[in-house]
């Protein structure tokens, strides 16, 4: 199993290195921008071409795997049996279009429903976070250590803007109890910050491809990833997810309970 993890880890790092090289060229080019569920949910021709390239490369190397991917080039996956790849070709498309930085590409791999291997590239910073439970987590090949189990009052939190504005699930109280709120617009960049101890909480409504890679890497580093009921998340569903240090997630779950 360890050898299989190492093999897929190398595959993901090579693949996201290529994706990063391409997207750094694409970022300033003219883009065809369309909307999906609403005016702030964007998709570009580069989201689609990147996903096509990633899906084709995975299918060639792992023909028996199934693929859950954002822009529709993967499979209609109903079961977590075997190897399942989750692909978010450009995470933070709004940042890709408007700011030309703070966007990522993410692939999370699960084996029979369990987190197995993942990689996230912060494209403009050329930083790849990769690994899994059998091998540990690395930043461009350098092993990361577990972040400290910081309390809410001592850490910065990232919660989705709309959730805080509506005080959904008592999130304003979470912000008041913390060192402060940050909103970054890219799940992959937030996972990077939580893994390296810059922030202690990420709370947002996430789709399977937004969460899959971050969950593998965060759990491997001893961080907690749960739904608002405190239970493990179903990877084939979209839901509000709480990611953070053990202490922070316990405090936040208590605050969420008080909102009921
Ligand atoms: C979005 C980003 C954003 C999060 C949204 C996601 P996309 O991903 O990760 O941070 O708040 O929920 O949909 O659509 O740019 O891949
Ligand atoms: Ca995306
Ligand atoms: Ca995303």
Image (spheres, rainbow, N blue to C red):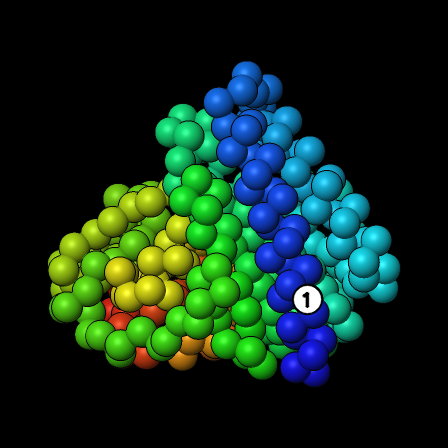
* Residue 212 visible, this orientation: no
Q: How many marks?
A: 1
Q: Extreme top residue here?
A: 30
Quarter of the image for residue 66 reads: bottom right
Please give the name of the residue rendered at 69% of the width and 79% of the height, measured from the top-left corner: 3
Viewer-closest of 146 and 81: 146
From the image, which quarter does the C terminus lie in? bottom left
* Image quarter of residue 230: bottom left
Is disc 1's CB within 8 Å of ligand 3?
no
Q: Position of residue 102 (x, y in %)?
A: 39, 41
- Residue at 60% in and 35% down: 22
Residue at 63% from the left image edge and 44% from the top image edge: 18
For the residue pair 34 and 121, the one nearer the viewer reads as 121
Give the vertical position of 239 relative to 123 (above or below): below
Residue plotted at (20% across, 69% down): 152
Place of residue 253 in the rendered image (x, y in percent of width and height, measured from the top left) = 32, 73
Q: Secondary structure at mark 1?
A: helix
User: According to the image, label 1 marks what residue?
Assistant: 8
Q: Please state which of residues 49 and 18 is positioned toward the viewer in this rendering.
A: 18
Q: Quadrant of the N terminus?
A: bottom right
Residue 119, x across and y down, in percent: 55, 59
Q: Quadrant of residue 213?
A: bottom right
Q: Is residue 177 left or right of residue 112?
A: left
Q: Residues within 10 Å of mark 1 (few under 14, many from 20)?
A: many
Residue 46 drawn at (x, y percent): 61, 30
Figure check: 7 above or below 73 = below
């Amino acid at each position: 199993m360890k050898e299989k993890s190492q093999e897929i880890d190398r595959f993901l790092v090579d693949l996201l290195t290529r994706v990063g090289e391409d997207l750094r060229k694409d970022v300033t080019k003219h883009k065809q921008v369309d909307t999906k569920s609403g005016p702030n949910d964007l998709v570009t021709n580069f989201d689609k071409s990147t996903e096509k390239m990633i899906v084709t490369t995975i299918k060639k190397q792992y023909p028996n795997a199934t693929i859950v991917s954002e822009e529709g080039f993967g499979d209609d996956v109903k079961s977590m049996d075997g190897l399942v790849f989750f692909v978010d070709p450009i995470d933070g498309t709004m940042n890709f279009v408007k700011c030309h930085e703070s966007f990522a590409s993410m692939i999370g791999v699960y084996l029979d429903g369990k987190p197995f291997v993942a990689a996230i590239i912060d494209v403009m910073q050329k930083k790849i976070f990769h690994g899994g439970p059998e091998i540990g987590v690395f930043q461009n090949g350098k092993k990361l250590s577990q972040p400290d189990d910081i309390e809410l009052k001592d850490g910065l939190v990232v919660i989705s803007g709309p959730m805080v504005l509506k005080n959904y699930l008592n999130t304003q109280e979470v912000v008041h109890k913390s060192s402060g709120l940050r909103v970054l617009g890219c799940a992959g960049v937030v996972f990077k910050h939580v893994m390296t101890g810059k922030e202690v909480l990420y709370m947002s409504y996430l789709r399977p491809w937004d969460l899959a890679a971050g969950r593998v890497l965060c759990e491997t580093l001893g961080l907690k990833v749960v739904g608002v009921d405190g239970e493990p998340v179903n990877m084939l569903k979209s839901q509000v997810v709480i990611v953070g240090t053990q202490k922070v997630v316990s405090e936040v779950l208590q605050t969420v309970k008080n909102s009921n």
